[in-house]
Amino acid sequence: MTSLILPTASLSTTPQSPVSSSSSRIQHTLTQRIHIPPHIYKHPAAILLELCTSLQELHQIIPLIIKNGLYQEHLFQTKLVSLFCKYNSLTEATRVFEPIEDKNDALYHTMLKGYAQNSSISDGFSFFCRMVEEGVRPVVYNFTYLLKGCGENNYVKEGKEVHAQVILNGHEGDVYVMTCVVNMYAKCRLVEDAYKVFVRLPERDLVCWNTIIAGYAQNGFAGRAIELVAQMLSEGLRPDPVTVISILPAVGNVGDLRVGKAIHGSVFKSGYERHGNVATALVDMYLKCGCLSTGRVIFDKMRSKNVVSWNIMIDGYAQNGDYAEALSLFDKMLDNGFKPTGVTVMAALHACADSGELTRGQFVHSLVNELGLKHDVSVMNSLISMYCKCKRVDIAAEIFNNMKEKTLVSWNAMILGYAQNGQIINALNHFRLMKVKNIDPDSFTMVSIIAAVTELSVLRQAKWVHGVVTRTCLDTNVFVKTALVDMYAKCGAITTARKLFDLMNDRHVTTWNAMIDGYGTHGYGTEAIKLFKEMEARDIKPNNITFLCIISACSHSGFVEEGRQYFYKMKHEFKIEPTMDHYGTMVDLLGRSGRLTEAWDFIQDMPVEPGINVFGAMLGACKIHKNVELAEMAAGRLFELNPNDGGYYVLLANIYVTASMWDKVTEIRSKMDERGIRKTPGYSSVELENEVHTFYSGSSWHSDSNKIYNFLEILIDKIKDAGYAPATDLMQDVEDDLQEQMVSTHSEKLAIAFGLLNTRPGTTIHIRKNLRVCGDCHNATKYISLVENREIIVRDLHRFHHFKNGICSCGDYW
DNA sequence: CTAGGGTTAG
């Protein structure tokens, strides 16, 4: 970095010594003034250079220059340096530049421009220093290149240095270079410093006003930018298209439709709406303000749409969830012969991902290769996300592994993909791999990792990830903290979750949702309602998820009236349209409490076609309350919608079992055999010493199998003495004692026995089950918690059961 | 060589 420091002493004296003392310099100055004869500047080679458009063409022209003996001419040398710089070939430019013996000022200035625009900032600075040392006096526009480079690369220290040099060289009053200084500070996010320079300018023209306005707009100070536009108007300056294009994105970002419309009006009056980029900026503003149709009208009217206009429109639809329209517009863009850019492809992939359109996603993927966007990391990251969202983590992983240049975003996309597709081990392994490769995680990484651990629901891992978050200082991020609250709640540590929640001073709606849902799934309905009321008291606006959580919490606690009120409140007070999940939860609320006909009527009154989850909730309620008639009706509709889910067949069969309708049971079982539908095998897992042990019903593969079965036998005798009666009414043609033996080896019981055997007395046992806990196991676990004096927390498919002193937090209501 | 400001984004 020291090479970037400018030679202040020699420079500051430059204004006082207009001509360098070196004698060769005097000669150079003289040659510069030599008149260039027309046979040189009108030579066909000179004209060809003027028309040159690419590096290849330039290479073809050079032999012509040499053949005609023009290579030594200053005009050609300068032009060659300039063109090589323009086509990004700095090595060739220096190859022309260095051997020249009598370099004139123009040559130095050209070379400097090349370094400043195409190379690293330090190269630009080094060359500047060299130029000064070799006696060339810097001219004012030399500083503009350097300032631009500082701004683009966030080089604050160097930028300030150039600012000082500009003043030392007496250019303080030059509005051109001072505008560059203003721009440099604004680009370095020091917009207040930019403003200080701006206000001290002796004269302020439209361009420098535009610069400071854009500066505030780009740094997130939309209001201030709008204010400055007003001030500019009051000083008698009329905005031009650049002013409009600078201010509109800021207006869009804050969603100030009123100001946006006012600008639209003035644009219309001045006739700027014919300016393609102004129209594009207007479309963008309307889309960001959520006015899709207005944006579309302007877009459709545009005569000269460019790629950016298409990109904005496509992305606007994708962002607003209208994936079909986004993709149809993408097709239209291709039909109109536009070449998609990386941004287009990312918007299209976003639409494919969120609508699960794998086939179209793969089509876009093929375009990526055709368009030569394979080396655009952002595009590749979008491909990874698309494949993950479309559940093809395998393809995503292949892309990820083949990427030469991975960014943090690539890692985040891959880890999130693994976490969301249940590949927890892969997610954690990639997190470890990141560390090996010395890539520091950010808040996005941590949210994904926390989600993965939440899926595991192992308290030990939860504490580990919490530790990582603290050590990496990412525990200040709201999203990370919210994920932690959710994680602790889902790991059964509801008290820890609440402690973290209370420690937060910057909660997001999702934070409240996580906590309310945590209470709900643990059966703490009263706490959930209390929290909702606190939200209201603090004027925090609930969203549709909040209502889903609170109604579900009411359902789990049997608060039917309260649940109904929240549903009403959501629709009428908060004007939130219920989703299918809300309807499902309402059916669950009514059905669970025994109001079966009411639940059925609720389904009939739904304004939309009921989905699978709605009939699923109905069927579940029929199982609890033993209603065969309604169960058959719900199941009929359910099998029409989803004929291949084994779980619902088993549920109906069990309803028949309870009603002793054995012929119906046989009928269902043979139907399942016919259609090749199988029940998901149930399993329970328990964590021990950093290892997760999984048990299936009646399984004996565990190395401690004998010990577990012996212990379980003693345990069941013990709870029988306490009053436990095993369920023996589950099958028709099986003897009671055999049935008892079958239920006694359910996976939950094996996992609990294993947990008790391997933990110290008094330790809480955490069990995870992939299905809903069965009635007999629920009953047995209550007794076990009593006789063993242990707290047992079972997380099943839908909720948590906290067993303590012979009772369960669900109040036998699940 | 002969200067300064603007639009889309995971």
Image (tube, coloured by chain):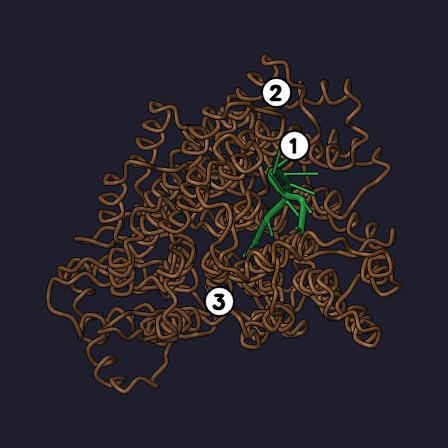
Rendered brown, the chain in question is A
Which chain does the residue under circle 2 lie in? A
Q: Are marks 1 and 2 in contact (CB under 8 Å)?
A: no
Is A750 located above or below residue B8 in the figure? below
Q: What's the mark number on residue A259? A: 2
Residue type at tag 3: Tyr
Judge depth for marks 2 and 3 and give the one in front.
Answer: 2
Q: Which residue is mark 3?
A: A418
Q: Do badges 1 and 2 share one subunit? A: yes
Which chain does the residue under circle 1 lie in? A
Image coordinates for residue A324, horizontal then vertical, percent? 74, 48
Q: Are marks 2 and 3 in contact (CB under 8 Å)?
A: no
* Alpha-carbon span between mark 1 and mark 2: 10 Å
Image coordinates for residue A118, horizontal then vertical, percent? 59, 60
Rendered green, the chain in question is B
Out of A337 and A226, give the one closest to the viewer.
A226
Out of A732 and A67, give the one closest to the viewer.
A67
Find residue A507 and report its image quarter.
top left
